[in-house]
Image (cartoon, helix red, strand yellow):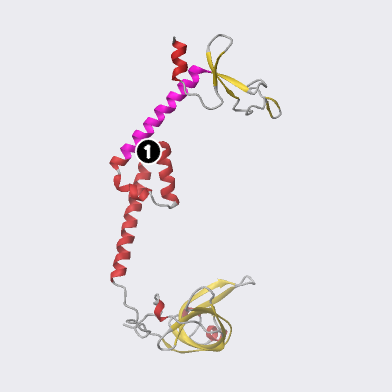
Amino acid sequence: MKDRDLTRSLVLNPGESFGTDAKGRPVVIRTCIRCEGRGRYFPGVCFRCNGKGVEQVLASTVLAKQRRKAYENQERVRGMRSFVRGHSSLLPLLREKSPFCVSLRQQLIRKGSLSDKQIDSLYATREKCARKELEKADAQRHVKVPGSQTVENTSFFGRIPEELLTDVLPGRRQITGVVTSVKERMGFNGYGVWKMLVVVSDGSHCHKIYGSVPKALLVAPGAGHANLRGKIVSFTAAVSPSPTEKGFGYYSRPVGGEIIGEYHNPS
């Protein structure tokens, strides 16, 4: 009677069947999980099934594993429900597609709970996202209407509005503009090369070009890389537009160079 109840409680997977062993105990007969039914496992006979390709497992052992797994699933579901009740405000964040949120969502589904540090990090991430949304909404409220900003009241040291940018025309010509950045970069020969970013304006529009600092601007009295930022310079170079960014280009083979003034930020 006990064996009959045992077999009734078991749930068999496809390819499994009931049987009895040499002692008359109920067993589950299934394909050997080590050799996958081949009877051999490198480098010889499979010792789990003794080369038969099938194995016999006590029905009581299989039933105990199934009950333990069912209990773990119940605990996992109970933990997930408890998390949802206690931290319902975090659910929209867990639906995000970022790797951080995806990994925590997968752990919550797999284990049914999160550690205290993980929960704290989720709350910190939610606050960070909320601040970004507020900043974005505030920026949208204070956005300027296209045409209301001109080159005269725009600082070349900040972000230049897209409506003020113009395409860079290729060719070799005289360049006159404001140096907004000077940095040292590693050259091909292993020595440092000074690069600078110049904003060129025609009075109504402007564009940026990037290249090496002309030697004349490095050796001129009162010049040098430390004093170039904010200066209005003039030199000759070959200019080429950027293929990906509007209002940006590169210059090469600069010749000459002189400082003709000082740039003042518009008030």
Q: Where is 103 relative to 7, above or below?
A: below
Three-letter amino acid code of the residue under disc 1: Ser
The front one of 130 and 3 is 3
Residue pointed to by mark 1:
113
Q: Position of residue 176 (x, y in %)?
A: 48, 88
Q: Callout 1: few (<14), some (14-19), or many (20+) C-alpha neighbours within 10 Å?
A: many
Q: Mark 1: which secondary structure? A: loop
Q: Which residues are magenta?
A: 58-83
Which quadrant of the figure has residue 213?
bottom right
Type of secondary structure dominating the magenta stretch: helix
Q: Position of residue 253 (x, y in %)?
A: 60, 83
Query: Is any part of residue 110 visible from this angle?
Result: yes
Total labels: the figure holds 1
Residue 80 within the segment the image draws in magenta: yes
- Residue displayed at 33% across by 65% down: 136
Q: Where is 163 relative to 40, above or below?
A: below
Q: Where is 102 relative to 236, above or below?
A: above
- Residue displayed at 31% across by 41% down: 84
Q: Position of residue 256 (x, y in %)?
A: 56, 89
Which quadrant of the figure has residue 44?
top right
Left or right for 82, reference 249 = left
Q: Position of residue 125 (x, y in %)?
A: 35, 52
Query: Is any part of residue 256 visible from this angle?
Result: no
